Image (spheres, rainbow, N blue to C red):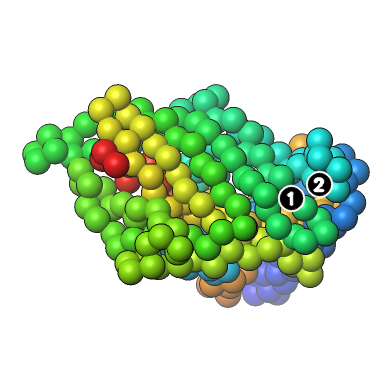
Amino acid sequence: MKRAGRCARTATQIACVVFLLLQGGASASPLDLSDATPRWIEVRFEVSPEDSPGRLDDVWSEARRAYIEPAGLPGHVLIRIPGTELEAQLRSTGAEPIGGSFSEFVWTLEPMTGHVLRAELSGRLREEYALGFLRSSTEVEIRVEMTTRIAAGFRPAKRIMGQRAHRFCVASKDARDCTIVPPIRFDRARGYVNAVGSLHAWTPIAGIRTFSPLGEVIFSEVHRNPEESSVFVRSSHVEPCPASTIDTCGPEFGGNLYELAGSAADVVDRE
């Protein structure tokens, strides 16, 4: 019985190692931005905690599908993240996207310089709010616009109708109380880029402009069927296959995801 138990544990460990090797080899290559051949690729989002929207390159989401193709402008490329993939990403952070309401998340990049000319999306979220003892929810329409061509950031957090809000600011105009999040052009060695910008949000009675953390991503080539589930990437803070749970090694080791900082839960206020 002891020998059988040892064999079972050994087999599980081997399976775990093979699983992780397959994961690592499947999406390890950074995106070749100079190749505009239409194809499926992958994208991972940096998931900043609500109280630290300026944190960079720390905890990463699982891989999501995206598609690269030539842009209308010569020498530029488009990367399109399907609305369904974006909704799944938002749900993983605790947000409540209205199903089918999100556009594609469209990135226009200039491969020669690595600049993101613009990255845009729109959609609707359901958000809770508080007015004294009254708690309710409402639909919030959002539009996100980001680029690597400006230096922008956020103001100190405020509580607005029971939610934390980090208002958007631009360095050249709001230097006094603006925490700058540096824009970072596309890094060919990693596929990493950080576009900065804002999230405009409107409800039937209010609107606000907050800092958006959705522009910090890693783009990767994909060497597998794009229809397969993407559960590859885990936070560097989570040790894969910890000894205490070796028998359950699998795709659930995806890292801890935090709430989306600057989400539309922070937007029920007038500008």
Q: Position of residue 134 (x, y in %)?
A: 12, 34
* Residue nearer the viewer, 42 or 247: 42
Q: In the structure shown, which secondary structural element does the residue marked by tag 2 occupy?
A: loop
* Residue nearer the viewer, 201 or 49: 201
The quarter of the picture where residue 28 lies is bottom right
Instruction: State yes or no: discs 2 and 1 in contact (Cβ < 8 Å).
Output: yes
Q: Position of residue 132 (x, y in %)?
A: 9, 41
In this view, 57 is above or below 154 = below
Q: Amino acid at mark 2?
A: His
Tell me: 19 left or right of 261. Answer: right
Q: Earlier in the sequence, mark 2 or mark 1?
A: 2
Q: Which residue is mark 1?
A: 109
Q: Is residue 120 visible to us here?
A: yes
x 45%, y 44%: residue: 199
* Residue nearer the viewer, 135 or 14: 135
In this view, 137 is above or below 155 = above
Q: Position of residue 256 (x, y in %)?
A: 49, 60
Q: In the structure shown, which secondary structural element does the residue marked by tag 1 occupy?
A: strand
Residue farthest to the left?
A: 133
Q: How many marks?
A: 2
Q: Quick one: quadrant of the C terminus?
A: top left
Mark 2 Cα shell of 10 Å, populated few (<14), some (14-19), many (≥20): many
x 75%, y 60%: residue: 114
Tell me: 263 left or right of 214. Answer: left
Q: Amino acid at mark 1?
A: Leu
x 68%, y 53%: residue: 116
Res. 76 mark: 2
* C-alpha distance separating marks 2 and 1: 6 Å
x 22%, y 52%: residue: 159
